[in-house]
Image (cartoon, grey):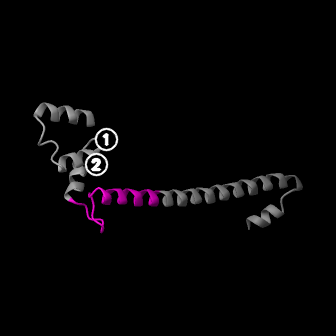
Amino acid sequence: AAREALAAAPPGATASVNAVRRRRDLRDAAKALRAKARDAQTLARGDELAKMKETLRALGHATREGVISLKGRAACELNTADELVVAELLMDGAFSRLDAATAVALLSCLC
């Protein structure tokens, strides 16, 4: 029905019809580009996730099957910028060999 109404429009109205069509085409193109960008972002996140998992496995924070180890759980509970480093130090017993002042100084550097 809308097409018939547009076809029956006066000759001067074709510019408006063309503008509406152009706007619709641009909207459709933008929608397609957003979908393409979303797909690319999903792929990039998948690659990033795979690298993160490999790093966690290499450091012993997760098993080959993706199960989080004790070391990984300890790293999850830490709230610093370098959770993995602090977890490594903790699990290696680095803090047990330090006196209290030295341990506090080391931890203050990591927070």
Disc sitting over residue 53 in the figure: none
Residue 100, image quadrant:
top left
Relative to 14, does residue 100 appear above or below in the rendering?
above
Q: Nearer the viewer, mark 1 or mark 2?
A: 2
Q: Name the residue under label 1.
A: 81
Whether residue 67 is visible, yes or no, is: yes
Q: In this view, does 50 lie to the left or right of 93?
A: right
Relative to 43, does residue 102 appear above or below in the rendering?
above
On whether residue 30 falls in the magenta region, the answer is no
Residue at position x 74%, y 64% in the image = 2
Name the spot of residue 102 as percent of width and height, x first: 16, 32
Q: Mark 2 points at which residue?
A: 84
Q: Nearer the viewer, residue 39 or 100?
A: 100
Q: Is residue 27 left or right of residue 39?
A: right
Residue at position x 66%, y 55% in the image = 27
Relative to 81, does residue 4 appear above or below in the rendering?
below
Name the spot of residue 30 as percent of width and height, x first: 64, 55
Q: Which of 74 and 97 is in front in this view?
A: 97
Residue at position x 29%, y 55% in the image = 59
Q: Is residue 90 left or right of residue 27?
A: left
Tell me the SS state at disc 1: loop
Q: Quick one: label 1, few (<14), some, or many (20+) residues within 10 Å?
A: few
Could you tell me which quadrant the C terminus lies in? top left
Q: What stretch is highlighted in magenta?
A: 45-69
Residue 62, image quadrant:
bottom left
Amino acid type of the residue that numbered disc 2 sits on in the rendered structure: Leu
Residue at position x 28%, y 48% in the image = 84
